[in-house]
Image (tube, rainbow, N blue to C red):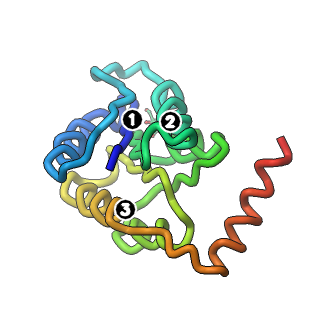
Amino acid sequence: MKIGIAADHGGYKLKEVIHPFLVKLGHEVVDFGAYKLDNQDDYPDFVIPLAEAVANGEVERGIAVCGSGVGASVAANKVHGVRAALINDHFSAHQGVEDDDLNILCLGGRVTGNMAAEEYVTAFLTAEFTAAERHLRRLGKVHELEKRD
Ligand code: RB5
């Protein structure tokens, strides 16, 4: 799978763990930065380009990391077509895809340890949207909101 990753300074170290992990799993990785640790950088500068790449199909799924994962999820969800969520447990990492068609996994670099992050990433990437009628109906109601802008 072609996976995009992005992080600010709060998520930089975890991104640098996730990147080789994805390569080891056989994925193609597009890194949207940051490319160095800069405590003054801002998560939207990296997360929005990632979110746009997910929305336009340049990458199939994304992983966004900031300090808590909150800012990354807030920013990513502003891009139409993105369904991003902060994930702190294994169940939500796969159920978010299966039921809600999650396409960006957000993690907190200051919250989630490396091994847990790798488990969440694996669960996220191996899950598939079920496209069950009830989930399509619910997502349809969410997507209606994007027509208001
Ligand atoms: C940066 O210090 C921090 O605020 C950011 O990484 C993130 O946690 C925001 O949600």
- What is the CA distance from the residue labelled 2 to the residue labelled 1? 11 Å
Q: Residue at label 2? A: 53
Quadrant of the drawing holding the C terminus: top right
Q: Earlier in the sequence, mark 2 or mark 3?
A: 2
Using the image, tell me which numbered label, if any, was put on residue 140. none
Q: Earlier in the sequence, mark 1 or mark 3?
A: 1
Q: Is residue 78 above or below residue 37?
A: below
Residue occupying the point 34% across, 70% down: 90
Residue occupying the point 27% across, 41% down: 28
Q: Earlier in the sequence, mark 2 or mark 1?
A: 1
| Circle 1: residue type | Ala
- What is the CA distance from the residue labelled 1 to the residue labelled 3? 16 Å
Q: Kindly tell me whether residue 68 is visible in this rendering.
A: no
- State yes or no: Cβ of the residue under disc 2 lies below 8 Å from any atom of ligand 1: no
Q: Does residue 22 appear to the left or right of 127 in the view shown?
A: left
Q: Residue at label 1? A: 6
**Viewer-nearest of discs 2 and 1:** 2
Q: Kindly tell me whether residue 39 is visible in this rendering.
A: yes
- What is the CA distance from the residue labelled 2 to the residue labelled 3? 18 Å
Q: Does residue 21 appear to the left or right of 54 in the view shown?
A: left
Q: Does residue 28 appear to the left or right of 103 in the view shown?
A: left
**Percent position of residue 102, x then y:** 51, 59
**Percent position of residue 121, x then y:** 31, 57
Residue occupying the point 47% across, 35% down: 50
